[in-house]
Image (cartoon, rainbow, N blue to C red):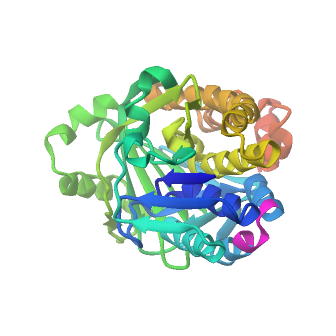
Amino acid sequence: MKVAVVGGGPCGFYFARLLKRSRPEVDVELFERGPEGATWGFGVGLGGRTMKEIEDTDRPVYQAMIASMRFTRTQIIHLDGEAFTLEYGAAAGAISRLRLLEILAFACRDVGVKLHFGTPVDSAAQLDGYDLIVASDGASSRLRQEREAEFGTKRRILRNRFAWYGVGRPMEPMALIFRSFEGGTFVAHYYAYSDSMSTFVAECDEATWYKFGLDRMTDEARKAVMERVFATELDGAPLVANHSIWRQFPAVTNAHFYSGNVVLLGDSQRVAHFSIGSGTRLAMEDAAALHQAFQQCGSDVAAALARFEEIRRPGRDTFGEAARRSFEWYEDVARHMRQPLMPFIHEFLTRTGRISDERLRTYAPSFYDAYHGRRQGEPVA
């Protein structure tokens, strides 16, 4: 069997590694249009459940990742001058995106995957002769675009604008800032992912975008505005840009996960909204599920792809609904921010429908106690 993986992101690398490690006789090649060692973005987050699955599936990769990750259970939520510190029941981990790709590329080479950097693939026609083509080429997947009718692709462009930055120091604990500033509505989310760097995501609603004239500014000028809005948190540190383009989020979904011998993984299949921080997690879980399908179905590509969709469909659909509720909440964030701090945080934590009030007891126990204490007239700790 010959397998072509298109896209050198976490899910492409991870699937290539898993398949070649378990099936050494399979010819696995990965094609990435960019040069090795170049990536946009800063740090990425991975939750405890995903790390446990990676540990169970591929312990060497797990150990390499753990050695480069930073973990925390604490998050501060700020709302216009007030704040509450959340202590979560489980730790969240973060790692440099570049370091994660280095680990996965090394792991691929270690088992004999052939890696081709600087090699764009814009059409499945370029890969004639391969039994399986894995489209892990991201939200703007060219392989998906040429078969959108078959995949049943739908897209919705959200109104809010956002950009990803870095900050050259570890900003701890991680935080979410909801700020009304000079008549505009801004949001920032930051977390440390190494001893020297943090990810910093800035966002504003559509009304603010035009009110501040951000639509007429360069990205460098927009960065300066964010440094002014979040000056307190940055404490003199500049925002670091790396492909930090202000844009609207494309909410892309696909009715079908495969067409013929082409299968979609990660953001090419469903673009994970950053407000629930699950893009890398879902991508790597996709990779593990596709590998599982081939473990169960051998070299029968058609059967394996059908099994993959069967495995992933329930979780992906559940996640998709949660993501929709989350980004719609953010699209109307100015209205939500009119609430007092504690009801606002409660609404924020339960916005996706996945966290019931009862589950909140174990998910964020300190907030649960404080929130219900206040509702009963007790002082907040």
Image quarter of residue 16: bottom right
What is the tally of numbered marks visible in this picture? 0
Q: Position of residue 214 (x, y in %)?
A: 21, 41
Q: In the depicted view, which residue is nearer to us: 266 or 264? A: 264
In this rendering, position of residue 86 left or right of residue 372 = left
Farthest residue, direction front: 129
Q: In the depicted view, which residue is nearer to us: 211 or 155? A: 155
Please state the extent of the stretch shown in magenta in the rendering: 57-62
Image quarter of residue 32: bottom left
Residue at image position (58%, 76%) is: 106
Image quarter of residue 22: bottom right
In this rendering, position of residue 24 left or right of residue 132 = right
Residue at image position (76%, 38%) is: 371
Q: Is residue 136 a member of the stretch shown in magenta?
A: no
Residue at image position (31%, 41%) is: 247
Q: Position of residue 206 (x, y in %)?
A: 32, 30
Q: In the depicted view, which residue is nearer to us: 70 or 312? A: 312
